[in-house]
Amino acid sequence: MDLQKQITYWNDGAKDDFETVKILMDRNRILHGLFFCHLVVEKSLKAHVVKETGEIAPKSHNLFYLAEKAKIDFNEEDAVFLGVLMKYQLHGRYPDYNPYIPEKKQVKQYLNHTSTLQQWLEKKL
């Protein structure tokens, strides 16, 4: 297995998905945008899992599990944000799960936080 190719795959996917987040948010597709925010962080963490373990990333969507496997420690604010994103990934997978739709101001903060985390994780690769 080419580890660098796997790392690049996940990292590039995170960056591409962030572009999708911006499009979705511009079109007021908030729940879909937040689902993609989760994907951005998930893929960024999977790049770190590959780097840390030398193995293919697990088929898991649990950000806390992936962070633990990647040996990434988040500060309290970021850890709380991971929990927020975990709620929104359920909406994209389970149609009967209807999470709270935040106000525009909060959505903008989530968008900025996702961007900050993705960039921070990319720098750590």
Image: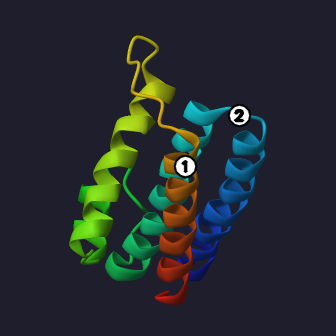
| Residue at mark 2 | 28
* Whether residue 43 can be seen here: no
Residue 7 at x, y percent in the picture: 55, 75
Instruction: Please tell me how crowded label 1 is: few (under 14), some (14-19), or many (20+) other residues with Cα within 10 Å.
Output: few
Indicate whether 88 appears above or below 52: above
Q: Which amino acid type is shown beneath numbered disc 1?
A: Lys
Residue 115 at x, y percent in the picture: 58, 68
Q: Which mark is residue 39?
A: none
| 62 vs 102, nearest the viewer | 102
Q: Residue at x 53, y 40 (%)?
A: 35
| Residue at mark 1 | 105
Nearer the camera: disc 2 or disc 1: 1
Q: Which amino acid type is shown beneath numbered disc 2?
A: Asn
Q: Earlier in the sequence, mark 2 or mark 1?
A: 2
| 50 vs 111, nearest the viewer | 111
74 sits left or right of 6 in the view:
left
Indicate whether 54 appears above or below 97: below
**Image quarter for residue 69?**
bottom left
SS under mark 1: helix
Q: Residue at x 67, y 54 (%)?
A: 17
| 8 vs 22, nearest the viewer | 22
Q: What is the CA distance from the residue labelled 2 to the residue labelled 1? A: 13 Å
Residue 110 at x, y percent in the picture: 50, 55
* Whether residue 121 can be seen here: yes
SS under mark 2: loop
Residue 31 at x, y percent in the picture: 55, 32
Q: Residue at x 27, y 74 (%)?
A: 74
55 sits left or right of 120 in the view:
left
76 sits left or right of 46 in the view:
left
Indicate whether 49 appears above or below 101: below
